[in-house]
Image (cartoon, rainbow, N blue to C red):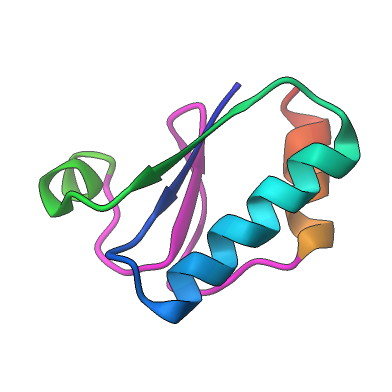
Amino acid sequence: MLIQVLGPGCAKCKEAEKIVRDAVAECGITATVEKVTDFKEMMALGVMSTPAVVIDKKIQCVGRVPSKAEVKEWVSRLR
């Protein structure tokens, strides 16, 4: 599973990345968490607002920081 956290590095983007990493660790799944800061790559994924979370090329949220419970639900459902 590839989880991408998109954002330029602002406080909300860093918070989103921490939540994703913590949720993955708590779920005990094998996943690669990747931070994407390149705007061209974000646009190629169809994201125009950050922070955003993309799991296996499917956009899960855009323009907000997800809750840890949301991330756990996404990774459990997409295993």
Instruction: Answer above or below: position of 2 versus 15.
Output: above
Residue 27's x, y, as percent?
88, 37
Left or right of 15 on screen, residue 62: left
Residue appearing at x 80%, y 39% in the figure: 25
Say whether residue 28 is magenta. Answer: no
Instruction: Answer above or below: position of 38 versus 18.
Output: above
Left or right of 75 on screen, residue 41: left
Between 58 and 71, the one nearer to me in the picture:
71
Residue 60's x, y, as percent?
56, 50
Between 5 and 63, the one nearer to me in the picture:
5
- The N terminus: image quadrant: top right
Residue appearing at x 65%, y 51% in the figure: 20
Residue appearing at x 67%, y 47% in the figure: 21
Magenta stretch?
Answer: 46-67
Say whether residue 47 is magenta. Answer: yes
Left or right of 70 on screen, residue 45: left
Residue, far left: 40
